[in-house]
Amino acid sequence: MEKTHYLISNEESKRIQILKFWFTIMVIFWHSYREEVRFADGDILMNASPWLEQIKCLISQVIVRCSVPGFFLLSAILLYRRDFRWQENIKKKLRTLMVPYFILNTFWIVFYFVGQSIPLTSHFFANQDKMIAAWGVKEYLDAYLGRLPNSDHTYYFPMLDPLWFVRDLFVLNIIAPALKRIIDRFPKLILTLLAAMLVF
């Protein structure tokens, strides 16, 4: 049986570019939502009127949360639209995902270290989980692999928090052939499970 490929037309390509732009704006809105700003000598609460808080929450915590799943969906469409060789795909993703991931994380570690070393700026970099001078090998591994806990100790991020997306995207590319086989074998079951996950 001949395999069919999903060919992306010129129009669809332009729409994908527009979606990427809007998803990027939405990610910025999502990460700009703050109820307080934390400093070493105390927190500053940012209070607004209740109706303004509701609008802010609706935009920054509800609507824009489709942005990250949207990026994952676009990545899946672009990967699975044709047959791919695992080795070639991983080699490409190492170059396009992991090299920037390593460089940006390293920059952020150095940036924090410098900020913590200067008395004038040290109180802006007072996160106890990220005191670079006190780190050992484990903490450096955590900073790159994503084991630094956030405030509720539930999710684990690399040193530069937003890069969790790049890390997880790379992991999904590693297991992409297995995922494709499972989805091709049980498409209705997977669709049902995904719909149930969305609801619950």
Image (tube, rainbow, N blue to C red):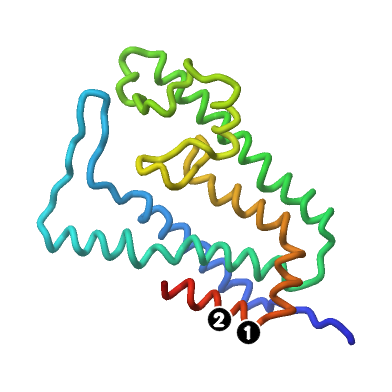
Residue 22, position as x, y percentages in the image? 45, 64
Q: Residue furthest bottom?
A: 1
Q: Compute the Cα span from label 1 to label 2.
A: 6 Å
The mark found on residue 188 in the picture is: 1
> Which residue is drawn at the image coordinates 36% and 55% (left, top)?
29
Instruction: Name above or below for residue 110 compared with residue 47.
Output: above
Label 1 environment density (alpha carbons within 10 Å; few <14, some 14–19, many ≥20): few
Image location (x, y in percent) of residue 31: 38, 50
Percent x, y of residue 100: 63, 40
On-image quarter of the N terminus? bottom right
Say which mark, if any, is on residue 192.
Answer: 2
**Residue 191 figure quarter:** bottom right
- Name the secondary structure under disc 1: helix
Q: Do the residues labelled 1 and 2 touch (CB within 8 Å)?
A: yes
Quadrant assignment, res 82: bottom right
Answer with left or right where residue 102 lies relative to residue 143: right
- Please tell me which residue lies in front, 104 or 175: 175
In the image, residue 125 sits, relative to residue 181, either above or below, namely above
| Residue lying farthest to the right in this orientation | 1
For image coordinates 27% across by 65% down, the residue present is 58
For the C terminus, which image quadrant? bottom left
At numbered mark 2, what does the secondary structure look like: helix, strand or loop?
helix
Nearer to me, 31 or 129? 129
Q: Going by the image, does 48 lie left or right of 158?
A: left
Q: Which amino acid does label 1 sit on?
A: Lys
The kind of residue tagged 2 is: Thr
In the rendered picture of this protein, how many numbered marks are placed on residues?
2
Residue sitting at 50 percent across and 78 percent down?
195
**Residue 105 in picture, x, y percent from top left:** 56, 34
Residue 70 in the figure: left or right of residue 52: right
Name above or below for residue 103 compared with residue 171.
above
